Amino acid sequence: MGIDKQSDLVANIQIGPTTLGMVRIYIEGEGVDLPLDFDPEEADEIAEELRAAAEAARAMGQKAKPKPRQK
């Protein structure tokens, strides 16, 4: 599966600090139990990538919407 393919998979995601000073992204789904730990600097980089992807997706969504007809 690629990044641009839709999926029917359902998963839960939790994000929070660990007692060791890491940031954990925890993904849980059917047959998947995946804890991913990052140092705070890596977590900041991931957050920036998420924001950039959200902006790009928002821009794509606006292009896809038809403009209302003028009378």
Image (tube, helix red, strand yellow):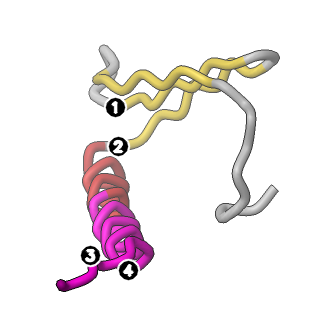
Labels 2 & 1 near each other (Cβ < 8 A): yes
Cα separation, mark 4 vs mark 2, equals: 36 Å
Q: Marks 1 and 4, how far apart in space?
A: 38 Å
Q: Amino acid at mark 1?
A: Met
Query: What range of the chain is rendered magenta?
Result: 51-71
The mark lying in front, picked from 4 and 2, is: 4
Question: Mark 1 highlights which residue?
Answer: 22
Crowd tier of the residue under label 3, counting other residues whose Cα lies within 10 Å: few below 14, some 14–19, many 20 or above: few
- Residue furthest out toward the front: 71
In this orientation, which residue lies closer to the viewer: 65 or 9?
A: 65
Quarter-wise, where is residue 50 in the image? bottom left
Mark 1 or 4, nearer chain start: 1
**CA distance for labels 2 and 1:** 5 Å
Query: Residue 21: x, y in percent?
Result: 27, 27
What kind of residue is marked 3?
Answer: Pro
Residue at the outermost left position: 71
What amino acid is found at the position of numbered circle 2 in the picture? Asp
Give above or below for 32 relative to 4. above
For label 2, the SS is loop
Q: Secondary structure at mark 3?
A: loop
Cβ atoms at labels 1 and 3 below 8 Å apart: no
Residue visible at 34% across and 31% down in the picture: 22
> On the image, numbered disc 3 is attached to which residue?
68
Q: Write the residue at 26% across / 75% down.
A: 68
Q: Please give the label number shown on residue 39.
A: 2
The answer to whether residue 60 is magenta is: yes
Quarter of the C terminus within the rendering: bottom left
- Callout 1 crowding tier (Cα within 10 Å): few <14, some 14–19, many ≥20: some
Marked residue nearer the N-terminal end (2 or 1): 1
